[in-house]
Structure formats: C-alpha cells, structure tokens
Image (cartoon, helix red, strand yellow):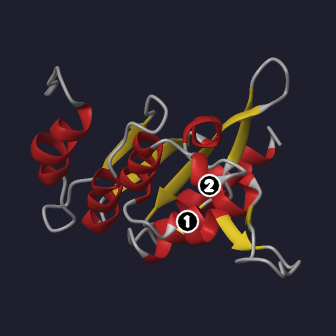
Amino acid sequence: KINVHIYTGDATRHLLTDVLPTITYENYKRALCLLDPYGLHLDWSAILQAGKSRAIDMFLNFPVMDMNRNAIWKNPGSVPRDGLERMTKFWGDDSWKQVAYVESPQTDLFGPAEMVKQSNEAIVAAFRERLKKVAGFQSVAEPLPMRNSTNAVVYYLFFASQKLVAEKIISEIFAKYR
C-alpha cells in the first residue's frame, strides 16, 4: 500500500501537527526523519518530539556555518537580535549561550571578564549530549563534518536513534568519510 502525503508551507508546523504525532512506539510504527533546515530555520520542538516518540530515527544537518555567521560571534554583544532568536529556537532554549561562550581565563582589572567563543567542536559535542539528555534519543553517532569545496565545515551530519545497533551501522558508514 502506497501512503504518500505532500504538504506545502511551514515544514516544522506540518511535522509537529500532521506527521510526527502519527508515529508512535505504542502503535508499533517506526520512521526515519531527515531534517535539512535552511540555516537555523528549524524549531527544536520538532527534534524533541521525534526523540520523545521513541519510534523515530533522525538525520539532522546541524548548520554550524549559519550559526557562526548569524548567531555565535566572537563579540556576543554585537549579534543581531534575530540571530539570537533563531539560535534559541533551533537549540530550544538559551542554554546554548553557556555552551558557545565561556569566561576568559585572563582577568580584567577594569570590568567583567571577557566572554570567549568556543570551538565548533565544543558546540557540536554539547548538541550531541542535548539530543540524548533532553530530546531522549538513546544513541547519537559522532557527527560527520560536511565540507564545501574550500574544505570549510558547512554543517555536521547527526544521526540519532533509540537503537544502539542503528548508531553502530551509521558510525561505520561515517567512518569511511572522515
């Protein structure tokens, strides 16, 4: 039986209202969700709902280049408000700020300590933990950095699942491209 539905409009809204609620562990349904947001245009609630369903495996393109261009700058005070809001919506709350910035180990005698931007790898590692601890995925493979023609990392490809065997299979595939 072919069961295909095409939705137009806001993909996150359709995921949250029309697609993800129909995939439940209790109904013995499983799904593979491919999330390829245009930059930071994804709502954490879609990721959270997929994880909490206990029935959905997920690939996610984590848009680290867009984060660096629009939200996570060396000078956090100069980031435009819309960049901060999109980052918070993508991450799910403001906790990304504690991940993205830490106080400089050098003290400042004339004011508060300077905030230092953390590496992409630190932010990616924190998001991986967030997928496990907050979204409820049991297994999250080490993400694969995806590079452009100039070898710059554009995004990280995440895989999250409820099954350890799925993570192991994806990790073996990712290892071929590292």
Q: The residue tagged with tag 1: helix, strand or loop?
A: helix
Mark 1 and mark 2 residues within 8 Å of each other at the beta carbon: yes
Q: Residue at x 66, y 52 (%)?
A: 143
Estimate the x, y position of residue 173 in percent, counting from the top left.
70, 44
| Corner quadrant of residue 148 | top right
Is residue 166 rendered to the left or right of residue 18?
Answer: right
In the rendered view, tell whether residue 35 sits above or below residue 119: above
Estimate the x, y position of residue 70 in percent, counting from the top left.
56, 38
- Which image quadrant: the C terminus? top right
Quick one: 171 or 63, which is closer to the camera? 63
Residue occupying the far front of the picture: 110
Quick one: 106 or 118, which is closer to the camera? 106
Dot 1 alpha-carbon crowd within 10 angstroms: few under 14, some 14 to 19, many 20 or more: some
Q: Which mark is residue 97?
A: 1
| Corner quadrant of residue 54 | bottom left
What residue is pinned by disc 2? 76
Question: Can you see residue 115?
Answer: yes
Q: Residue at x 72, y 63 (%)?
A: 122
Which amino acid type is shown beneath numbered disc 1?
Lys
Quick one: 41 or 13, which is closer to the camera? 41
Residue occupying the far right of the picture: 106
Camera-near label (1 vs 2) is 2
Q: Residue at x 75, y 69 (%)?
A: 114
Question: Can you see residue 164?
Answer: no
Q: Which mark is residue 85?
A: none
The tag earlier along the polypeptide, 1 or 2, is: 2
Is residue 166 rendered to the left or right of residue 42?
Answer: right
Q: The residue tagged with tag 2: helix, strand or loop?
A: helix
Q: Residue at x 79, y 38 (%)?
A: 177
Inter-mark Cα distance, 1 to 2: 9 Å
